[in-house]
Image: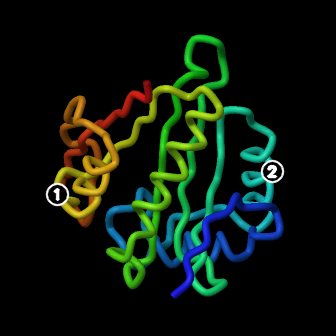
Amino acid sequence: MIITLRKLVPEDSEELLQLQHQLDEESTFMLLEPDERQSGLRQVREMIENFMMAETSVLIGADVDGILVGFMSLRGGTVRRNQHSAYLVIGILKQYQGVGIGTALFHEMHEWAVEHHVIRLELTVMTHNHRALALYIKSGFTIEGTRVKSLRVNGQWVDEFYMGKIIE
């Protein structure tokens, strides 16, 4: 298995959209439910183009043997007061979890953040997502607070941890 990390480009739109739909189907830990994603190919292409043009944002894909199996996005602030801070989203297909892709994505993201003077990374994670929580803590994130009844998943209230990492 050969893992390759790379910045996504507009030509990846179809594969990224397919990955997003598959993640929506197989995980209750992603934000959108399976029938909820409204973006089409044009919107995904525009999203990738916007990430490419933004100085404080990046979209990285993880390929295994040439197939896109995961991604990480980092969306940075757009004004002087928050351009040092960025919100992170990660998604990896179940069959490729636990083989180092998440760790590699977090390492790549850390390097990118240092290079682009982003000193605060933040994310949210459902409190019962123990596997992701362990990865985030291993990657240097700390729990800053709890968002009570933040989401409703399968008819049940779900709390989220708000996590942050300061890059010094």
- The numbered dot on residue 128 is 1
- The numbered dot on residue 152 is none
Horizontal and vertical percent for residue 87? 49, 38
Horizontal and vertical percent for residue 66? 66, 84
Q: Quadrant of the C terminus?
A: top left
Residue at disc 1, secondary structure? loop
The residue drawn where x is 70% and y is 58% is 7
Left or right of residue 112: residue 135: left
Left or right of residue 7: residue 124: left
Question: Sequence-wise, which precedes: disc 2 or disc 1?
Answer: 2
Which is more toward the observer, 25 or 114? 114
Mark 2 and 1 residues: CB-CB less than 8 Å, in contact?
A: no
Tag count:
2
Left or right of residue 122: residue 149: left
The image quadrant of residue 4 is bottom right
Callout 2 amino acid: Glu
Callout 1 amino acid: His
Placement of 23 over or under 114, stated as above or below: below
Horizontal and vertical percent for residue 69? 54, 77
Which is more toward the observer, 52 or 116? 116
Placement of 8 over or under 120, stated as above or below: below
Residue at disc 2, secondary structure? helix
Horizontal and vertical percent for residue 20? 56, 69
Which is more toward the observer, 92 or 160? 92
The image quadrant of residue 39 is bottom right
Which residue corresponds to mark 2? 49
